[in-house]
Amino acid sequence: MSGKPVFSGIVCELNPLHRGHAYLLQEARRHSDAVVCVMSGNWVQRGEPAVLSKFVRARMALACGADLVAELPLPWACAGAEPFAFGAVSLLDSLGCIGQLWFGSECGDAERLNRLASLLLSPAFSNALRDCLQTGKSFAAARQQAVTQLAGSEEAALLESANNILGIEYCKALHRLQSPITPMTVKRMGSPHDSRQEATPDAFLSASQLRELLREGQSLEGLLPPAAWQILQEEISAGRAPGDFSRLETAVIARLRSMSKAEFAALPDVSEGLENRLYEVSRRALTLEALYEGVKSKRYSHARIRRIVAAAFLGIPRNLPAKPPYFRVLAMNARGREVLRAASQKATIPLLSRPRDFLQGPEEPRSLFALEQRATDLFALTLPAPPACGWDCRQGVLALSSVDPAENGEAERVSKENR
């Protein structure tokens, strides 16, 4: 890399990696010397297991334009938009060498989203939100009304779209961290979240629709970037994909039925007596969908209930630090090594890749990695041919010897020295 390199960051789940993700990676690449992805692990923000393991999705990311992939630890990956964004952005900020944060949004205007983020952090907004919540509105409705009062309905409308909301949360995180990273956005390509579109060769299907097609046993050939499709095809042929949460349904319900009200009350995001509703419904629901529907209300969304159930099943504790205490590398190429070399001089948290790095380190990273290991062992049971326990310790960093995955061929390998 000549001169002072520009490193960009992307927060992602890649569940699975689709054309919209590939477009975002391409745009970040056009403006950067290297792209760093902070990616959710085996459990994602919907409170569900991913359809592909984090190791497979990290490999897809390298094949489609990323240079370095790090894991967003479980408690932040399975959190609501604000802690999810803050945890991920803090990891990028902690490297000390990231210049830009790229994300997709429905509006495609980073400056506008950043202005709204500043407003949401202001005392004026806090006061207006409190007043709106006192009328009995849900948080989302109260937030929208408060923004309408302060900035008008056009700005409030930004909060109606999922990617805009996440982009605003990324900007809020940058403000809170006083980070020098510049937010950059591209207009989101493809169909909205949870929508259905005809699966034509030129369609940009949403991740939710692609997951549905995958679980129905339909081929995604022509619907994913070619490199991602090739990797997916290999995983399906080997019996390592796709993951299906229904394989764990009875185990999850059994766990909930064994819990007391006090244990429910100790879960992240449980408040205002929600533990009583969770306790009662978990004793009569026979499916997870019946449980979610029985607990959700005007104040508590379907997504929030799913995350609470995941926390109960996986053992995610309530009291955690605001920021992840380490940066765990899952995959990298030659450019990714350059980023790590730059970060090694400036990073404010440990850069870890080998399991023994966690076992020999301080208590906080050790206990968090133990939680991650258990979550991976449970995730494994969602796969057609589950691997044995200990997968997280057996899998080393995916290290490519060049920047272009096509140049590696059989040289693509799991680096044994990192185990």
Image (tube, helix red, strand yellow):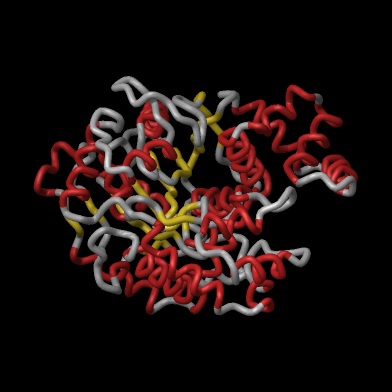
Left or right, 278 with respect to 371, comes to right
Identify the image quadrant of the N terminus.
top left
Is residue 251 visible to us here? Answer: yes
137 and 375: which one is in front?
A: 137
Is residue 344 visible to us here? Answer: no
- Residue 10, position in %: x, y? 46, 41
- Residue 345, position in %: x, y? 43, 56
Q: Residue furthest left?
A: 410
Rendered position, 301 above or below 260: above
Q: Residue at x 40, y 58 (%)?
A: 246
- Residue 123, position in %: x, y? 85, 44
366 and 315: which one is in front?
A: 315
Rendered position, 154 above or below 320: above
Q: Residue at x 45, y 44 (%)?
A: 12
Q: Residue at x 83, y 41 (%)?
A: 125
Q: Quadrant of residue 311?
A: bottom right
262 and 291: which one is in front?
A: 291
Left or right, 315 with respect to 373, comes to right
Left or right, 236 with respect to 303, comes to left
Q: Quadrant of residue 392?
A: bottom left
- Residue 232, position in %: x, y? 24, 44
Q: Quadrant of residue 361?
A: bottom left
